[in-house]
Image: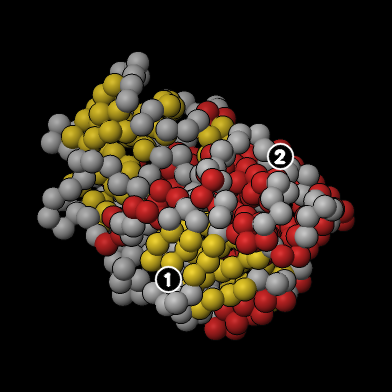
């Protein structure tokens, strides 16, 4: 990898997400050598991926170059590579561009879509965990309407304009709200020769409420907001398959759809080599102690979505969202220095700052500590928080200007098919 030798301890970080970037910043002024490895050369602000998918934002406004994060930091190196295997016995990392040894290793690989072993759904449904996937979804949405213009068969046309979102968490709720607003305010102008009123947005949730983990008030209000926007909410319905044309469930309910978005779960993005008794927890996460050390490997740490730190309040690990990753990254930066200086480590205590989700224009729900509020004020709070946590002044300004423009004009300018999805539509011609 052409990393120079150093008398400082070498800390290798796998992953440039919220946890990895937070840790890298914390180590910026310490006497250590830091090597950050990621398969992309940018950090993605994942909470706004759904806005890229629905044409509200361009991808470069929620991405930030990882090399720019490290500018001005001494003894910091970034390498664009995919990690293939961890050789814990020899403290070596095998990657697509070569091997590298480490003194301390931090796994911050985040999470990936969990299809729960259903190969059929994985093949035909669309996920939304990365910028390329979001661009695929944006192209698919627009291509479906272009295809709907080419047929006068009602059943075929309805299937092309029927969107099924599986999963009633924040991702599914926010995407459903955005699609409903597109149907109401944009599609009639873009497709005047198409009866876009027949377009359907179906949100399918296996549980008995939306936004599990939120307060009952927030869950109910989110459902009310969606229904007012015209979204059909199906609760207690478990999807069992999707063959590219028909969505099947455990009930008699079925959907003919050309666009199914799978937002029903995530799992840890694991790496080969981290195995052994008691290492891997449920959801493909890595068991760690209160210092984020991997069980059985005191020189290897895991933070963020990939880490499963079981506590009394969170017996199955902390929520797989940004805040635990950010907080763990900051504390681990302190603990690595303490470890090098032979000082006792500080245990991690999660500070739950609350949850929030937006359902569209002037509609959001917020659960912050003991406060529960919904509506316009919650929407402004949601916008402020997301702007605050975006990396880079330019990104904040671009997103803010886009939001103001979209709000005033009721428009989404990024309705572009930059990279065609090229879906096979032949199965809908019956």
Q: Residue furthest front?
A: 430
Is any part of residue 221 visible from this angle?
Answer: yes
Residue 249: mark = 1
Query: In the figure, is residue 132 to the left or right of 406?
Result: left
User: Pointer 2: what residue?
Assistant: 416
Dot placed on the residue nearer the N-terminal end, 2 or 1:
1
The N terminus - image quarter: top left
User: Image quadrant of residue 393?
Assistant: top right
Label tally? 2
303, 249: nearer the viewer:
249
Residue at 75% x, 60% y is 196
Classify 430 as above or below 172.
above
How many neighbours does mark 1 have within 10 angstroms: few (below 14), some (14-19), or many (20 or more)?
some
Residue at 59% x, 68% y is 202
The C terminus - image quarter: bottom right
Query: Separation of disc 2 and disc 1 at Cα?
Result: 33 Å
As helix, strand or loop, the secondary structure at mark 1 comes to strand
Is any part of residue 181 visible from this angle?
Answer: no
Residue 208 in percent (x, y) is at 47, 81
Residue 264 in percent (x, y) is at 45, 63
Residue 355: mark = none
301, 399: nearer the viewer:
399
Classify 201 as above or below 296.
below
Residue 399 in percent (x, y) is at 72, 47
Residue at 62% x, 57% y is 156
User: Image quadrant of residue 273?
Assistant: top left
Residue at 17% x, 48% y is 275
Query: In the figure, is residue 169 to the left or right of 143?
Result: left
As helix, strand or loop, the secondary structure at mark 2 comes to loop
27, 42: nearer the viewer:
42
How many neighbours does mark 2 have within 10 angstroms: few (below 14), some (14-19), or many (20 or more)?
some
């Amino acid at each position: 990898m052409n990393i120079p030798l150093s008398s400082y301890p070498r800390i290798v970080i796998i992953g440039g997400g919220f946890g990895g970037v937070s840790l890298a910043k914390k180590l910026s002024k310490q006497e250590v050598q830091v090597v950050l490895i990621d398969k992309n050369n940018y950090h993605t602000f994942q909470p706004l991926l759904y806005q890229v998918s629905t044409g509200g934002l361009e991808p470069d406004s929620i991405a930030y170059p990882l090399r720019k994060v490290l500018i001005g930091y001494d003894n910091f190196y970034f390498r664009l590579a995919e990690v293939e295997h961890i050789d814990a016995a020899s403290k070596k990392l095998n990657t697509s561009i070569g091997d590298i040894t480490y003194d301390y290793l931090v796994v911050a690989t985040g999470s990936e879509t969990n299809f729960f072993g259903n190969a059929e759904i994985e093949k035909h449904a669309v996920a939304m965990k990365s910028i390329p996937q979001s661009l695929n979804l944006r192209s698919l949405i627009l291509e479906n309407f272009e295809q709907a213009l080419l047929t006068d068969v009602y059943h075929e046309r309805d299937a092309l304009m029927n969107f099924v979102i599986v999963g009633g968490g924040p991702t599914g709720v926010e995407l459903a709200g955005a699609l409903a607003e597109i149907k109401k305010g944009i599609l009639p102008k873009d497709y005047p020769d198409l009866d876009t009123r027949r377009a359907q947005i179906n949100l399918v949730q296996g549980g008995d409420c939306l936004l599990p983990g939120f307060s009952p008030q927030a869950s109910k209000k989110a459902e009310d907001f969606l229904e007012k926007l015209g979204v059909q909410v199906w609760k207690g319905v478990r999807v069992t398959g999707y063959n590219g044309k028909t969505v099947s469930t455990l009930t008699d309910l079925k959907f003919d759809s050309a666009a199914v978005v799978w937002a029903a779960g995530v799992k840890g993005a694991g790496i080969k080599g981290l195995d052994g008794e008691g290492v891997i927890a449920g959801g493909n996460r890595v068991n760690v102690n209160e210092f984020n050390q991997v069980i059985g490997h005191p020189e290897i740490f895991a933070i963020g979505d990939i880490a499963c730190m079981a506590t009394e309040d969170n017996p199955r690990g902390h929520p797989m969202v940004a805040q635990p990753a950010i907080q763990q990254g900051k504390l681990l930066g302190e603990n690595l220095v303490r470890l090098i200086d032979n000082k006792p480590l500080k245990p991690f205590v999660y500070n739950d700052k609350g949850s929030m989700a937006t359902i569209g224009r002037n509609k959001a729900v917020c659960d912050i500590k003991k406060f529960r509020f919904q509506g316009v004020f919650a929407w402004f709070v949601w916008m402020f928080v997301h702007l605050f946590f975006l990396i880079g002044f330019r990104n904040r300004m671009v997103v803010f200007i886009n939001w103001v423009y979209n709000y005033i004009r009721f428009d989404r300018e990024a309705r572009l098919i930059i990279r065609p999805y090229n879906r096979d539509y032949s199965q809908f011609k019956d």
